[in-house]
Image (cartoon, rainbow, N blue to C red):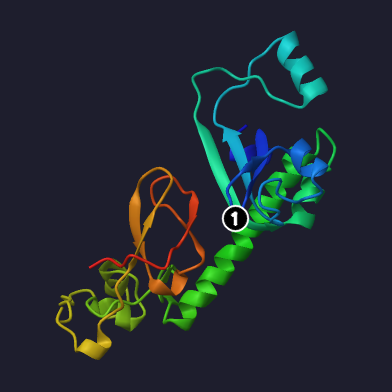
Amino acid sequence: MPLDDEYADRVSFECQECRLEHSLRHLRKRGGECSKCGSLMWSMVTEYNERKEAHGILPLLAHAVLGIELISRNARTTRVETPRVSADEALAIARAGILQYQRLAFRYMEFRRQVDGEQDRETMREHGGRNCAVCDMFYMPAPEKAWTQESCCSKACRAKLPGQDHIVFQSAPTTLPTAEKPAPAVVVTCRCSFRFDVLPMYIGAYRPCPRCGEKTIVPEGPLAR
């Protein structure tokens, strides 16, 4: 089912340490402990099928008895990974009823996305992040973009301020004193093979891939030049 239906088609857990995948049954059997490395920290993986469900008696029986949805083959699946799930939280989802755990997993995923998003914004605020005075979009000021220093996320928003209709913005000099140059970004490689840069302050945290949306832990290096 699509995300809008608030129901996960498939739920599994990957060990945060060794990345071994566990089914809900396996997780219950192990009491929330990884069978390979003994870790008690998990990443919850929820999948959502963006397509029409199959109709007929067989699909209805499959859903009623097994709790699964039979769908057409021409489909696109959205995969969402929720990191840093404790063993107790994972077990609470795994032990829910056969027709309940999919909705419980979705609600937990949504809750964590909201909480993690707020935490990310607070971290960015500590490093100068702010909300645009015009559109209220959260952004990070950049030394080479003069309008960001005036509480605006873009030239278009800056032009909307009273008396700014004819202002022409000029970027600040690209050459900065050594002490003011931003730190080099950390290169992150996603499972989908896409490489992207993040700020060094996120080392050890999880950041979403711009291409597929999956969160990947930020390593200590290498740094982009």
Residue 105 appears in the figure: yes
Residue depicted at x 39% and y 72%: 200
Q: In which quarter of the image is residue 96?
A: top right
Secondary-structure class at tag 1: loop
Total label count? Answer: 1
From the viewer's side, name the closer residue of 18 and 79. 18
Residue matched to label 1: 17
Q: Tell me the quadrant of the picture where the C terminus can be found.
A: bottom left
Decide if residue 224 is on the left or right side of residue 61: left
Decide if residue 160 is on the left or right side of residue 37: left
Query: Vertically, is 85 above or below 176?
Result: above
Query: Vertically, is 19 above or below 23?
Result: below
Q: Quadrant of residue 80?
A: top right
Decide if residue 10 is on the left or right side of residue 62: left
Residue depicted at x 76% and y 45%: 104
Query: Vertically, is 99 above or below 52?
Result: below
Q: Quadrant of residue 48?
A: top right
Location of residue 30 in the rendering, given as x and y in whole percent from the top left corner = 79, 45
Location of residue 175 in the rendering, given as x and y in whole percent from the top left corner = 14, 82
Q: Tell me the quadrant of the picture where the N terminus can be found.
A: top right
Location of residue 135 in the rendering, given as x and y in whole percent from the top left corner = 42, 68
Residue depicted at x 48% and y 79%: 125
Residue 136 appears in the figure: no
Query: Vertically, is 122 above or below 3?
Result: below
From the viewer's side, name the closer residue of 197 and 111. 197
Residue count near mark 1 (Cα–Cα under 10 Å), binned few <14, some 14–19, many ≥20: some
Q: Which amino acid does label 1 sit on?
A: Glu
Residue farthest along the top direction in this orientation: 57
